[in-house]
Every structure is written in structure tokens, then in C-alpha cells.
Image: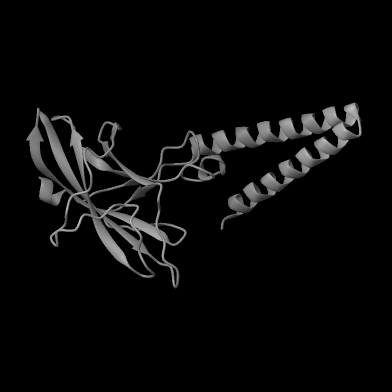
Amino acid sequence: MTLWDLFFLFSVLLLLSLVIALAVRILQRRWGAARRTVLIAGSYVAAYAAVLIVVALAMPRLYLAPGERRCFDDWCVAAISCEPLKTIDGNRIWLAKIEVSSVAKRVRQRARDAQAEMEDTQGRRYPPSAAPLCDEQGIARSLSDELGPGESFQVLLPFRLPPTAQPAGLVMHHGSFPGAIIIAEDSAVFHPPALARLDMASGR
């Protein structure tokens, strides 16, 4: 947990206490004190939002090397490789290989909100064009599949890109809240999410 995470928790507790104080003052019909409480809360939210946006715009984008693992708590994901499969209706289908792993010691887990987008060299993003494909063992695994402590599996996702587009990497999503409103978080609003590079050797 970073200092910004702790600051976010402090902010949540502070606003919660102000809301409780506001309710008490309204019940007591202390309208002047209630207005001051609203002003304090509004000013704090505005200042927090300003810092959130400024830091998000100033913070450089994170780039991950092919195969470099990124963890969200104990759930981890890595973009491995990408290769062209075929052309359909003038568009090219690219197959991305992703590894999902767990660094948990005891519990089984899954990331129900995990999603992947392919970003091309022009910054455009594309969702998967179909369900995950089967691996060499004939098993189709999804990003949201459950895995046990220390386990890992690979996900094969197809993406349909225009014929002139070239993949630059994958953008992995693991839910938007509360990361979108935590200062200096990679998924904060107005900040470009991390780009996981793909090994394109097999696609040349």
C-alpha cells in the first residue's frame, strides 16, 4: 500500500465524518454550522480532484516489457506474444497470448472484472473480436477464470484490427474503482493506462 492509498483512505474517512457531522447539525437545526460543513467538504473534494487531475496529466505512462508480470494484489497478468492469424473482410485477426497467475499463498481467486484491449501504434484500442480460443490441450481459458495459490494459465484472445493497423500492446483492465479516484494510480482518470508490450517476432 502506497502513501497515496493511505491518503485516499484518510480522505474517505474525513468525508464520511463530515457527512455525519452535517446530518447531526441538520437535525439540530444549526443551519449556519451545516453550511460551513458543506463548504469544507466541497472545498476538500475540489482540491482533491484538482490534485488528482494534475498528477494524472503529469505522470508518465507505464510501459511493460513482453512477459513482464503486473500484479493487482495477488492476481497477476502478463502479455506474452502476438501473431497474425488470418484476414477476414479486409481486417486482420491477431492472436494475443496472455498469462494469468497468482502469487497468493493460500486462497483461490479470480478477477471477474478483468478485461483486455489491444492498442495499435496510433493509440486506437480494440476489444476482443471473439471468445478466447483453445490452447494446445484444447482448453479455452478466460481472464476471469479461477486459479489457485501459485497457479497460472494462458489465455488466447483474438483481436480484429484494420489491415493497416499494427499492434503496439495490450491494455489490461482490472476494474475502475477505486483506482480511478486514487492520486498517482495508473488507472486514475485522465491518465493513460499501462501498455503491456507484445513479442511480435512471430508476427513479422
Q: Position of residue 138 (x, y in %)?
A: 14, 58
Q: Quadrant of residue 134?
A: bottom left
Q: Which quarter of the rendering shows the N terminus? A: bottom right
In percent of the image, x 69 and y 49: which residue is there? Answer: 10
Q: Is residue 94 left or right of residue 22?
A: left
Vertically, is 82 above or below 129?
below
Q: Position of residue 160 (x, y in %)?
A: 19, 35
Q: Quadrant of residue 168?
A: top left
Q: Which quarter of the rendering shows the C terminus? A: top left
Tally of marks = 0
Q: Is residue 54 left or right of residue 200?
A: right
In percent of the image, x 17 and y 29: which residue is there? Answer: 162
In percent of the image, x 30 and y 64: which residue is there? Answer: 152
Vertically, is 78 above or below 85?
below
- Colouring method of the image: one colour
In percent of the image, x 28 and y 37: which residue is there? Answer: 127
* Along the viewing direction, whichever of 201 and 106 lies nearer the viewer: 106
* Along the viewing direction, whichever of 12 and 147 lies nearer the viewer: 147
Q: Position of residue 58 (x, y in %)?
A: 50, 37
Vertically, is 127 above or below 202?
above
Q: Is residue 171 left or right of residue 141?
A: right
